[in-house]
């Protein structure tokens, strides 16, 4: 049996790209890392594996705690982590969702080609930068008052449709149609709403960005056709989340859980894993608040996407409809969702790990995806009808140097990863180190001169921290996802213009 | 009192020291400001804040959380932080103030939140003197990871 050890943690190779951390000590279930040898070595370099092991302590965790190929250290739960807990008898854990609730990514298509955009890059990047708020302050596309915020929290993209910021197709091509009906705006604190009010329709900063891209490759023609992607096509990628509203909500509930369920917290190896017991009032409240934040984030991305349509209208002097600027899909990658999955159970009907299972049955689970994307395969009823024959689109932003990928949910995802795959390239280098290695303006100049990629940012420090070299190899992450059958390669895109905060 | 920004894979950490708790917490707050922007101008008005919590780490967490909140709703970056920390019965209280530099005066990034990850608030020991003088109080140190 091939094994690898990192800092006292042993992993056994189950099969190619699947590594298991056997259950021992206080671990409730085993853990798995899905990675090539090269990616595994990187995962072993920071505290990812310790955090993955800690995640196996969550009450009611079922199957395995899973680390995706792009996994890296987060807080509490690793980024690139999937943990499914029993809705009836387990818990829900805000830290296993992340501060940026419904951080996610959407891709919008156009009927423009790279040739149509060449020569307009500077104009386009300036116009996008001027019209989409980013960075700290800067306001939002919509100046929200409290009524607006309540409506957004309650109804998600339905609100945007009513107010003229969306068309019906935008809803049908979004995960959950852009609206979580379990949202409870009253469970979101006034502090969170105060922060969100000034940020409705804004990008934020850090690793959030908006990118005009060109499709460079289509790997599966049938899926490419179903998604409407072809080489040289211009597409737009938007990556951002629920802004201060979501961040505050996660913070609020971590503290509430700490104060109310301190005893449960004391049994967990990391405060950031703080979890509310399933069925408790706090668990219900957090779920309702989280769903409201999820709605906010979808509206955020919808507003930005619609504003991009308006910018393109101005730059290219025709209607966005005539440029076929339709939403391909929107996926969340920091989220916990109630989903039904088939799990192994013991004779008493309790979930157990695969080898000990007497039977398999359907259980409702809180699937926590923190830096991981849902990846439902062909035939799954929740995949929009336009894509049901080929599988759910997955959008994986890489880096400004490597480009991004579109995948489709693979046949093996439900069995292996609770219907999930990676979310991006994962960071390799810390922000402080990146600022020492890279100088923002140099990175910008080199990208423009060597790669014809036009970047505009609020701060040079952000560009340095997001330099291509700080990310893992997204090609390798996607290769593993494809080989495992959890997310199959469909297309690859490369940046043309990028704006960030 | 002083602070330092430390590496962390995806985020930023602040390590701070101070002669007493208040100085130390204020130094962490200055570190939070430094993580947000590189050059800090002299502009802005001072404002106050008071936060109470059930323990020291919780207090540091809630204090930084409150600063992030004030930042977003006032539209300012809280710098030149000052604070005193005291015990009040079962709780700890921090009475603090900061100078709020308007966003329009700085190029700043969004630090999303404070985390409990790897948080430390500890008294520092100073080495004993070779004679019988009492051990000098070495002050405090704190370590916080911020979500960027």
Image: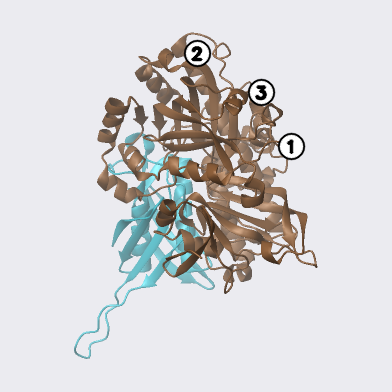
Chain colours: A brown, B cyan
The dot on residue A313 is 2
Report whether A399 appears left or right of A377: left
In the rendered view, tell whether residue A222 sits above or below residue A15.
above
Report whether B57 appears left or right of A267: left
Seen from this angle, which residue lies furthest front? Answer: A1
Secondary structure found at label 1? loop
Q: Position of residue A45 (x, y in %)?
A: 39, 59
In the rendered view, tell whether residue A348 sits above or below residue A319.
below
Q: Label 3 vs label 2: CA separation?
A: 19 Å
The mark closer to the camera, 2 or 1, is 1
Q: Position of residue A24 (x, y in %)?
A: 57, 72
Q: Which image quarter: residue A395?
A: top right
The mark closer to the camera, 1 or 3, is 1
Whichever of callouts 1 and 3 sits on the residue coming sooner in the sequence is 3
Whichever of callouts 2 and 1 sits on the residue coming sooner in the sequence is 2
The dot on residue A381 is 1
In the rendered view, tell whether residue A95 sits above or below residue A179.
below
Residue receiving disc 3: A169
Q: Label 1 vs label 3: CA separation?
A: 18 Å
Q: Position of residue B134 (x, y in %)?
A: 26, 86
């Amino acid at each position: 049996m091939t094994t690898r050890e990192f800092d006292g943690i042993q992993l056994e190779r189950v099969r190619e790209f699947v590594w298991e951390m056997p259950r021992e000590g206080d671990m409730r279930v085993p853990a798995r890392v899905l990675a090539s040898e090269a990616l595994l070595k990187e995962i072993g370099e920071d505290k990812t594996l310790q955090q993955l092991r800690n995640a196996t302590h969550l009450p009611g965790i079922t199957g395995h705690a899973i680390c995706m190929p792009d996994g890296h250290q987060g807080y509490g739960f690793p980024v690139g982590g999937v943990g499914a807990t029993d809705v009836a008898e387990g818990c829900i854990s805000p830290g296993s969702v992340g501060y940026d609730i419904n951080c996610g990514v959407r891709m919008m298509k156009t009927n423009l080609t790279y040739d149509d955009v060449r020569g307009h890059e500077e104009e386009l990047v300036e116009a996008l930068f001027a019209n989409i708020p980013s960075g700290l302050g800067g306001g939002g596309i919509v100046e929200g008052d409290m009524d607006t915020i309540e409506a957004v929290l309650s109804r998600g993209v339905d609100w945007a449709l009513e107010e003229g910021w969306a068309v019906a197709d935008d809803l049908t091509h979004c995960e959950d149609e852009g609206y979580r009906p379990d949202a409870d705006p009253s469970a979101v604190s006034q502090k969170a709403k105060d922060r969100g009010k000034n940020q409705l329709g804004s990008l934020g900063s850090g690793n959030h960005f908006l990118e005009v891209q060109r499709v460079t490759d289509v790997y599966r023609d049938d899926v490419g056709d179903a998604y409407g992607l072809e080489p040289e096509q211009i597409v737009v990628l938007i990556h951002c989340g629920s802004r201060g509203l979501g961040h505050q909500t996660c913070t609020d509930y971590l503290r509430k859980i700490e104060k109310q369920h301190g005893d449960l917290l004391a049994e967990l190896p990391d405060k950031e894993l703080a979890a509310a017991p399933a069925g408790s009032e706090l668990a219900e409240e957090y779920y309702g608040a989280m769903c409201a934040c999820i709605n906010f984030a979808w509206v955020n991305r919808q507003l930005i996407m619609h504003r991009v349509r308006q910018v393109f209208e101005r730059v290219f002097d025709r209607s966005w409809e005539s440029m076929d600027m339709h939403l391909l899909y929107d996926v969340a990658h920091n989220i916990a969702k109630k989903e039904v999955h088939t799990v192994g159970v013991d004779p008493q009907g309790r979930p157990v790990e695969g080898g000990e299972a007497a039977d398999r049955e359907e259980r409702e689970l809180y699937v926590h995806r923190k830096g991981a994307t849902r990846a439902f395969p062909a035939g799954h009823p929740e995949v929009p009808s336009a894509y049901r024959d080929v599988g759910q689109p997955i959008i994986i932003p890489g880096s400004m140097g490597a480009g991004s990928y579109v995948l489709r949910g693979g046949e093996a995802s439900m069995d292996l990863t609770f219907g999930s795959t990676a979310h991006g390239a994962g960071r390799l280098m810390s922000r402080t180190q990146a600022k020492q290695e890279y100088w923002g303006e140099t990175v910008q100049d080199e990208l423009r001169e060597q790669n014809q990629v036009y970047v505009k940012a609020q701060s040079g420090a952000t560009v340095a921290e997001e330099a291509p070299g700080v990310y893992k190899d997204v090609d390798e992450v996607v290769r593993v996802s494809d080989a495992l059958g959890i997310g199959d390669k469909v297309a690859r895109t490369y940046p043309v213009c990028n704006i960030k905060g | 009192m002083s602070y330092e920004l430390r590496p962390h894979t995806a985020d930023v950490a602040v390590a701070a020291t101070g002669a007493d708790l208040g100085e130390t917490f204020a130094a962490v707050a200055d570190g939070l400001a430094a993580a947000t922007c590189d050059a800090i101008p002299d502009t802005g008005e001072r404002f106050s804040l008071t936060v109470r919590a059930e323990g020291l780490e919780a207090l540091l967490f809630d204090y930084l959380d409150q600063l992030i909140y004030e930042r977003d709703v006032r539209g300012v970056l809280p710098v030149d932080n000052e604070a005193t920390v005291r015990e009040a019965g079962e709780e700890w209280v921090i009475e603090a103030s900061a100078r709020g530099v308007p966003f329009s005066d700085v190029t700043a990034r969004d630090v999303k939140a404070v985390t409990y990850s790897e948080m430390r608030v500890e008294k520092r020991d100073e080495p004993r003197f070779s004679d019988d003088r009492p051990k000098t109080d070495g002050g405090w140190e704190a370590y916080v990871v911020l979500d960027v």
